[in-house]
Amino acid sequence: MFRFLHASRWLLLAAFLLAMLPADSHAQFMSARRLGMGGAPVPGCGPGAEGVNVAYRAVPRPQHGCRAMSLPIGALPLIANPPVLDPDDPDFNAYELANLLMTMPWNYSLSSPETPSNDIGVSIGRNSLSVDLGDVGQLLPRDASEHAVVARLPVLAVGYKRAFVGVSPLVHAENSMAINAPLQRALIDGEAFAPLTRYEVTDDAIGQAAVQGMLGWAQPLWIPADDPRGGRSGLYGGVRARLIRGLAYADAQSVAGFTTADTLFGDDAVDVAYSSRLRTSTPEDGGFGRGFDAGVVLVAGRTEVGFAVNDIATELNWKVRERLVQEDSTGDVVETTLAEGQPWTSRIPATGQLTVTTRVAGFLLASAATRDALGRTTGCAGVERWIGFLALRAGVSRDLQRQTQTSGGIGLRFGRFGLDAGVATHSRNLTHERSTELGAGFAFYR
């Protein structure tokens, strides 16, 4: 039993850490202007507005818009002091690496939570065994840990009048991991392992990548007869049909665990079991799929309200190879092919976003609520005020851990060129403790 715990500790730890990765880690890559406003979208500034809401293709650009570019200032300390990757090195720390993956240091870290210690204590008695994971035990989830990411990368599109065509990559990943109650008590609460007890970890994962061609239509649905505020007021709508070609697919339903004997250190061997059912597909076996996006935008003077739903009824067809990987009675891992070229249909869950922006007494107010692929909702709101060539910004957001985060920033404008800086708190780490990051970038104004 002890040999099993020693050999599998890094495998189980990696599964735990991967399962705890958050879906909102992309938030740090936004422009420094948006970072200072809590992540709230800014009309006419920054890439991707029409990628999230197709109706924005029909909305006239504001008279005073901009394009922003964020700088990877957080990568400089990482290049100067790279992490230790060798597990045999005494300075190696798996939790530090996991935090690094969760944060993805595009922005510069001003403060970080203390890294959990690697120290693990093991107590062995005549017929007892207990493991004290210390700080690490508090990181393990008591309930099923889930995360999902649907990444719609920048769209390359060309249009003629109200119609347009485009192409874009698409990536979807999900993971759900759970440990049963006896293993929770042993690893989290520090209880001793009991005889004749099943200790088990289950993990379900899916990942798929594709390229999609788009055919869309966006147009004004209603324009007021008289719009004295710049000619943008109206109701706009858009739809986008997507023909998707699958490039790679994999899913796995895995179970790993062991059953203790009636005597922990007796002559009977511990019943160790591992099995995983896999489905995989390579580019040559990827088929075609389809999906739909829809959105509307209402512009009323200085106020904009947008609502979009993406990946409506999105499915992809594949020919997959099905395999069963499991441990046999001798302890060897054996792989068995169950089927080749098996038809399979995968799905990408729908997501949605509601945005509201307005200008009041010289202040820009912006907010957004986003529904992710697991049905979880996050929200953010921000404010911006220009005083001559200086912009002052502040924001607040509610993350997936239901923690309130705050931010602030400034902007400087010199003609058509600008500099932006923003500071924001976040909880993208293993302990979900509040940390602070700095973002910086350029802006190009029209």
Image (cartoon, rainbow, N blue to C red):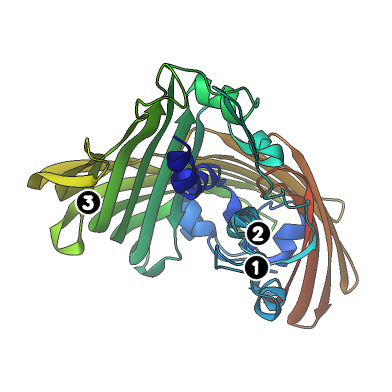
Give the residue at mark 3.
280
Q: Earlier in the sequence, mark 1 or mark 3?
A: 1
Is 380 situated above or below 281? Answer: above
Give the residue at mark 2.
28
Q: Earlier in the sequence, mark 1 or mark 2?
A: 2
Q: For this view, does 174 lie left or right of residue 409?
A: left
Which of the two residues, 424 or 313, is positioned nearer the viewer here? Answer: 424
Amino acid type of the residue that numbered disc 1 sits on in the rendered structure: Trp
Amino acid type of the residue that numbered disc 2 sits on in the rendered structure: Gln
Q: Residues within 10 Å of mark 2 (few under 14, many from 20)?
A: many
Point out residue 384 in the picture as x, y percentages from the top left corner: 82, 57
Give the residue at mark 1.
106
Q: Quadrant of residue 396?
A: top right
Point out residue 240 in the picture as x, y percentages from the top left corner: 34, 52
Give the label, 2 or 3, closer to the camera: 3
Q: Quadrant of the C terminus?
A: bottom right
